[in-house]
Image (cartoon, helix red, strand yellow):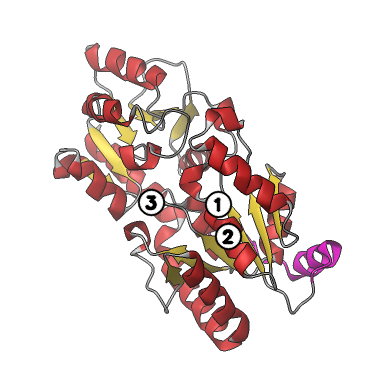
Amino acid sequence: MKVNFILDLEKSLVGSGVYSSAIRLANKLREFGIKTDVNGREFPYDIYHFQTSLPQSLWKAKILKRKKRSYKILMTGHTTIEDFRNSFLLSNRINFALIPYLTKFYSYADYLIAVSDYNRKILLRYGYNPSQIRVISNGIDLTKIRKKPKIRIKTRKNLGISDQQLIIITVGLCIFRKAPDIFTEVALATPEHQFFWIGKYLPLGTIAHSSFLREKFKLARRTPNIRFTGYVSRLTLEALWNAADIFLYVSREENQGIALLESMAYGKIPVVRDHPVFDWLSSERECLKGKTVEEFSKQIRRLAADKKLRENLRASCEIALRDHDIDKSVKKLANLYTEIT
């Protein structure tokens, strides 16, 4: 079986969740014995699996659909109107045009992959046939050893952060949808702890609410307990993830949130927005939830004061994370490929 992942604008997507998830899945499918190319040119393949929904992707899907074919077309449906809103320049103004665009694009698929139950509900809302949608998490590699106490100690020492201080991190693009403004306000409200936002800066002229965010970034630079690192190397990211204690995920909208899964694998305690995409995590059992700056700050202070709560949440996270093992995801994907070819 030969599979081609269509990942348009691949170089521009480096560092994004879409890119990381696609590359990770492609590598694992190869290990599983399925020949998988990314933007391959060996026409025809048995499966064309679209990872992006850009205009180039629409054009390619249209051509592939028209051809007399024995192959199947799959699309991962992680681009939605809700996820696009509040992201890039003009994203809110052209939001209305995205409905017919996505409807047309996804109509070329024989099957849609939803990355979460929440993602599936949104796709169903667009009018897609439930029998043509499968829920398969992007998943992460749980065999990889992430927790490294020596790196944690060394990194915290290099940063000059005491054992009494918590390190709170998030990972993601610095765009309005991801809520760097809320993250900054929580840091201001919780000055006794250190906050790190790890993720690529995009030119302010290319993102939504750029004037508002410009002021928030200026405020963050004047705030001693918050650092926006920009894009960092994998080794630096590993060091910061080990040094951290809490993963604060205040994003306004997600279809899954692969960075959350990674953070849980590092043993970080999730404090997340009370949003349906995180319904698979139970508040007070695997995470703590909030909606406002005050609530997020309160939850961080609770964790700082209660070591037993931290230990209980961390242990429950390890169990919940098993459902997102990438080996399970690859088996489900391989079974679907076999079923439809």
Q: Crowding at label 3, few (<14), some or many (≥20) Cα neighbours within 10 Å?
A: many
- Residue occupying image coordinates x 53% and y 64%: 264
Residue type indicated by callout 3: Ser
Quarter of the rendering occupied by the C terminus: top left
- Seen in the image, is 307 located left or right of residue 156? left
- Seen in the image, is 178 located left or right of residue 57? right
Front disc: 3 or 1: 1
The residue singled out by tag 2 in the image is 185
Answer with mark 3 or mark 1, whichever residue precedes in sequence. 3
Q: Quadrant of residue 211?
A: top right
Q: CA distance from mark 3 to mark 2?
A: 31 Å
Q: CA distance from mark 2 to mark 1?
A: 6 Å
Marks 2 & 1, CB-CB < 8 Å contact: yes
Magenta stretch: give its range.
142-161
Question: Along the line of sight, which residue is nearer the eye, 262 or 275?
Answer: 275
The residue singled out by tag 3 in the image is 137
The residue singled out by tag 1 in the image is 181
